[in-house]
């Protein structure tokens, strides 16, 4: 790709140094300071379209290309783009690898990738090699090799990657992060988090609607049930850790003064998805014979270099209300998402919880104070606005994003490491150091500001 050759020529001298200073930028090679970011989308399914909707509200970018192998999703995206008054983008999707032709376009500066999980790393690697500023949906990688692919490609090319973890921008999470930075909880000790979400109607549908209505998956289904359910059939591990682990990793400065050291994981038996099939499709339905490998509740305990522990729970195959189960605990007190409660020694009545309402209001993050009203309709309670905004603003300047390739690798590594631990009866697994030792002196991102 000519764009890749030009990029490599421009960065050949500095390229060797990026592993020494991983937060560095090669400068504004696209000249985005006073012009519009030229953005492309690879994947315009439900998640990609959500990002597209938010992009179409902005005046500082152009949508120059879209790609999807589903013609219906292309039609939906083109209609939205036209109705928003944007120029018609170039369209790709004739084959699984047509996205590579999109990446050759000179009129693409940055790309948002929102495709099935198995395509995430390979598409992100190709995008970085093409010199594109890359936004990648979660999880970023499926294997340790893929985690290293993301880091190595970033370091070899100088192209930046941002993992688009929207929960990092949830209003209560940013308020609690503000508390952490202001030492409200004291020295941090313990965290809990996870993805506790009844996904049975996501993993099965009737082939006509994206959620529920039947017990089909794979080729007989549409949307996520077409591909996501296979991970529950074939894998036993925490396949979706970043909604919980991402926000906690930022709070305890993972890859920036701290790092994940090891984990242990255990899984329960797997009955939830089978029971759902039998209940809604009958014992004679072909899918009732499918044996699901993924345990219904997977519990992972992570140790950090600074001595904190993090319990991450994956609970998606049983009936339950939604919760990410956050707990942030330090020497002076703790906050728990479930129950919306907080306890701070010397501030709360002894041995009694406070409602977290006034605390979250007091420490409301500057981003939400400034953009909260605008973000409200952006999806997932507004946090989708903030994650795309951070990506666009970072890409316009071609600088390291708040959530970078090292974060994408470390958070996503929980999946293959949990699989290995479960396979070996809970045996501890060592985390690779994706920064190659530089976590010791990498500085935390400045999260407490009102820009992005």
Image: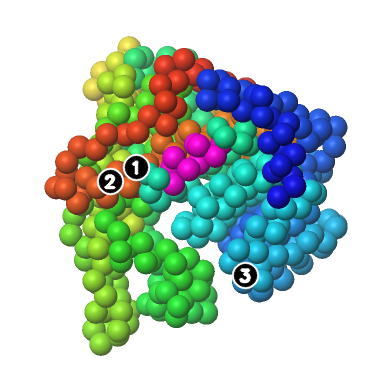
Residue 192 at x, y = what percent? 31, 35
Left or right of residue 98: residue 19: left
Q: Position of residue 128 (x, y in %)?
A: 62, 43
Pointer 2 local density, CA inside 10 Å: few below 14, some 14–19, many at least 20: many
Horizontal arrangement in the rendering, residue 198 relative to residue 375 (left or right): left
Question: To which residue does mark 3 refer?
Answer: 95
Q: Provide the residue designation for mark 1.
A: 414
The residue sitting at 38% across, 29% down in the picture is 433
Magenta-highlighted residues:
146-154
Residue 418: give its label.
Answer: 2
Q: Quadrant of the C terminus?
A: top right
For marks 1 and 2, give the CA distance.
6 Å
Residue drawn at point x = 53 percent, y = 20 percent:
20
Residue 232, quarter of picture: bottom left
Q: How many marks?
A: 3
From this viewpoint, is residue 260 visible? yes
Relative to the observer, which residue lies in front, 31 or 219?
Answer: 31
- In terms of sequence position, does the residue under pointer 3 or pointer 2 come before the other? 3
Looking at the image, is 245 positioned above or below residue 87? above
Residue 148 falls within the magenta-colored stretch: yes
Residue 83 position in % (x across, y down): 81, 62
x, y percent for residue 353: 31, 28
Q: Does residue 368 lie above or below 216 as drawn?
A: above
Residue 393 shows in the view = no
Distance between the alpha carbons at the discs numbered 3 and 2: 33 Å
Please tell me whether mark 2 sits on a helix, a strand or a loop.
helix
């Amino acid at each position: 790709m000519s764009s890749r050759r030009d990029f490599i020529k421009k960065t050949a001298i500095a390229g060797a140094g990026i592993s020494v200073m991983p937060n560095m930028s090669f400068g504004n090679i696209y000249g985005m300071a006073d012009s519009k970011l030229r953005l492309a989308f690879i994947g315009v399914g439900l998640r990609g379209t959500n990002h597209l909707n938010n992009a179409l509200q902005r005046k500082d970018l152009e949508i120059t290309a879209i790609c999807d192998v589903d013609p219906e999703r292309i039609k939906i995206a083109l209609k939205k783009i036209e109705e928003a008054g944007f120029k018609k983008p170039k369209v790709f999707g004739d084959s699984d690898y047509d996205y590579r032709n999109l990446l050759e376009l000179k009129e693409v500066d940055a790309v948002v990738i929102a495709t099935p999980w198995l395509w995430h790393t390979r598409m992100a690697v190709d995008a970085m090699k093409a010199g594109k500023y890359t936004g990648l949906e979660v999880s970023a990688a499926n294997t340790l090799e893929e985690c290293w692919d993301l880091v190595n490609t970033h370091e070899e090319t100088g192209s930046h990657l941002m993992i688009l973890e929207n929960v990092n921008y949830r209003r209560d999470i940013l308020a609690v992060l503000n508390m952490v930075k202001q030492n409200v909880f004291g020295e941090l000790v313990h965290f809990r988090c996870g993805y506790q979400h009844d996904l049975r109607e996501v993993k099965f549908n009737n082939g006509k609607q994206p959620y529920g209505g039947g017990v089909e998956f794979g080729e007989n289904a549409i949307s996520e049930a077409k591909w996501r359910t296979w991970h529950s059939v074939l894998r036993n591990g925490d396949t979706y850790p970043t909604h919980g682990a991402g926000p906690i990793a930022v709070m305890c400065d993972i890859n920036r003064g701290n790092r994940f050291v090891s984990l242990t994981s255990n899984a329960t038996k797997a009955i939830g998805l089978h029971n759902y099939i039998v209940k809604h499709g009958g014992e004679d339905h072909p899918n009732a014979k499918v044996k699901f490998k993924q345990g219904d509740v997977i519990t992972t305990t992570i140790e950090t270099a600074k001595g904190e522990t993090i319990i991450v729970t994956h609970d998606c195959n049983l009936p339950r209300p939604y919760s990410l189960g956050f707990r942030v605990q330090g020497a002076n007190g703790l906050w728990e998402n479930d129950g919306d409660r907080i306890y701070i020694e010397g501030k709360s009545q002894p041995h009694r919880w406070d409602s977290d309402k006034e605390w979250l209001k007091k420490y409301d993050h500057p981003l939400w104070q400034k953009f909260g009203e605008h973000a409200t309709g952006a999806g997932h309670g507004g946090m989708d606005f903030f994650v795309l905004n951070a990506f666009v603003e970072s890409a316009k300047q071609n600088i390291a994003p708040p959530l970078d390739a090292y974060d994408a690798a470390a958070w996503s590594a929980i999946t293959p490491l949990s699989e290995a631990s479960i396979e070996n009866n809970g045996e501890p697994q060592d985390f690779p150091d994706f920064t190659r030792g530089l976590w010791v002196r990498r500085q935390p991102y400045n999260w407490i500001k009102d820009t992005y």
